[in-house]
Image (cartoon, rainbow, N blue to C red):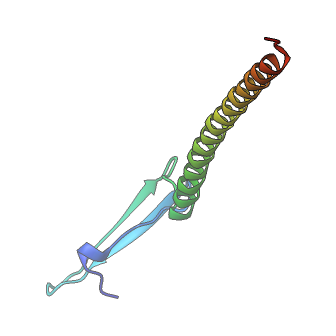
């Protein structure tokens, strides 16, 4: 196989010791061959894990915003109901005081 330098990528699947052998064949008489080891410790997240974490964080943020909105709207609704009850009570007291007064 021929690999071009810009297209070569090594993807680590876990914390392990990886052994590589590279042979460079060019127009020279003898090819160049070398071996090397790479130990991967605490590899980065895979793409799937990254997407799952991103979606979960987004959902948590949306749930927090929704809970905040619901708590604010509930408080406003309760406050409005209290104000209406107070006004209704005040109106009923006013109407009863007008009806019971004798001139």
Q: At x 58% / y 48%, what residue is drawn?
A: 62
In the current view of this chain or complex, which residue is farthest to the left? 28
Task: Give the answer, above or below, for where 32 lies relative to 46.
Answer: below
The location of residue 77, given as percent across then percent down, is 68, 36
Q: At x 77% / y 24%, what residue is drawn?
A: 95
Q: Is residue 12 left or right of residue 24?
A: right
The location of residue 80, given as percent across then percent down, is 66, 32
Task: Give the answer, above or below, for where 30 lies relative to 65.
Answer: below
Q: Quadrant of the N terminus?
A: bottom left
Q: At x 24% / y 74%, what residue is drawn?
A: 5
35 or 74: nearer the viewer: 74
Q: Quadrant of the C terminus?
A: top right
In the current view of this chain or complex, which residue is farthest to the front? 103
The location of residue 40, given as percent across then percent down, is 48, 52
The location of residue 96, given as percent across then percent down, is 82, 21
Q: Is residue 86 left or right of residue 22?
A: right
4 or 84: nearer the viewer: 84
102 or 32: nearer the viewer: 102
Q: Is residue 82 left or right of residue 68?
A: right
In the current view of this chain or complex, which residue is farthest to the right? 100
Q: At x 71% / y 31%, what residue is drawn?
A: 84
Q: How many marks?
A: 0
Task: Give the answer, above or below, for where 73 lies relative to 31.
Answer: above
40 or 78: nearer the viewer: 78
Task: Give the answer, above or below, for where 30 lies relative to 11.
Answer: below
């Amino acid at each position: 196989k021929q690999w071009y330098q810009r297209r070569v990528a090594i993807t680590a699947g876990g914390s392990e010791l990886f052994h590589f052998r590279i042979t460079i064949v060019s127009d020279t008489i003898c090819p160049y061959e070398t071996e090397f080891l790479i130990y991967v410790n605490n590899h980065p997240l895979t793409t799937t894990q990254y997407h799952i974490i991103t979606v979960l964080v987004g959902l948590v943020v949306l749930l927090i915003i929704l809970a905040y909105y619901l708590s604010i709207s509930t408080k406003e609704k309760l406050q409005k109901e209290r104000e209406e009850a107070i006004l209704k009570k005040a109106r009923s007291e006013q109407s009863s005081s007008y009806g019971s007064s004798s001139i």
